[in-house]
Image: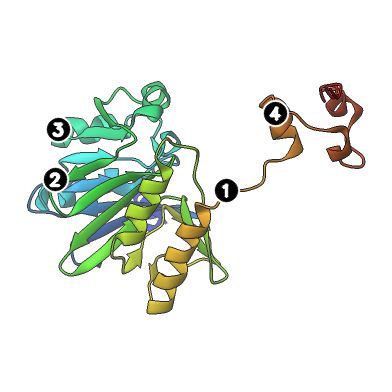
Amino acid sequence: MSAIETSISAQQPMEEIFPGVYRFSVGKRSRSYSYLLVRKQGNLLICHANRGSSVIDFLDEVDHLGGIALQFICEGADAARGELHEQLYERFGCELICHERDRKKVAKKTACPVSEFGDQGMELGSDFRAIDIGHTVFHWSNQANHFLFPGHAIERHDDRWGIHMHPVPDLATSLSTLADLPVDFLLPGRSSPREEEYHTFTDRDRRDYRQALRESLKPTKKSLQARLQSGEHVGEDEVELGLPRLLSSQIPPAEPEA
């Protein structure tokens, strides 16, 4: 097999998996995905390119579809090292969009012009939203279909939903917004051989998914170490059996009774 044939066989395809949704994949067993959303208002690329992207292999095809108006990433780790984002910007004039907390990490990886949004998220027209839960989740409505692009913030394993987030000022509003949005398909940023390449929601899935979002809002009991680190008073009777002496020494002495 020639070098050219080897290169072609190793190239992952550009697939239209739904009307207006094109997927680019990288990797053989564990795959990373990027998605091109074809819109009249301007095409969008949701990029999970930390391991490179086959988008670069299909620039002519992307051009014929209208190019790329904006590039988006779910978190700083999704930004590609090297020149991927710069090449896309040079070809299509598309800035890279990220949450403001990811700006420094992105700047270390790419010289592509960057615009940012804050904790309130971002809306483009009436069809596309970026929602922040400490990790950006994207939602797009097209031709009566509703797509969720959560990176790895929302995952489904063994018929259970996992919601992964970080503390943000108005998490309750963000999760409530997500729960209220219609959803038909979940398109992840990556998958392994034992996982679905994308998930189609049933009525039961929607109910369980929204319940998982609601459950994520319930306060969890702080660990003893977290309480100590925050300066919260912890009584000696709360020290768990086997707690390291170094940790137990951080417990403040009980105040004398009046």
Amino acid of disc 1: Pro
Pointer 4 with pointer 2, Cβ within 8 A: no
Label 2 SS = loop
Q: Mark 4 points at which residue?
A: 232
Q: Earlier in the sequence, mark 3 or mark 1?
A: 3
Q: In this rendering, which labeled residue sits more in front, label 1 or label 2?
A: 1
Between 69 and 6, the residue placed more toward the observer is 69
Label 1 SS = loop
Look at the image and tell me in which quarter the C terminus lies: top right
Residue at (28, 65) in percent of width and height: 182
Q: Name the residue under label 3.
A: 93
Q: Earlier in the sequence, mark 3 or mark 4?
A: 3
Amino acid of disc 4: Glu
Q: Which mark is residue 219?
A: 1
Label 3 SS = loop
Between 138 and 215, the residue placed more toward the observer is 215
Q: How far apart are marks 3 and 4 (CA)?
A: 51 Å
Q: Name the residue under label 2.
A: 67
Residue at (83, 33) in percent of width and height: 235
Dot 1, crowdedness within 10 Å: few (<14), some or many (≥20)?
few
Q: In this rendering, which labeled residue sits more in front, label 3 or label 4?
A: 4
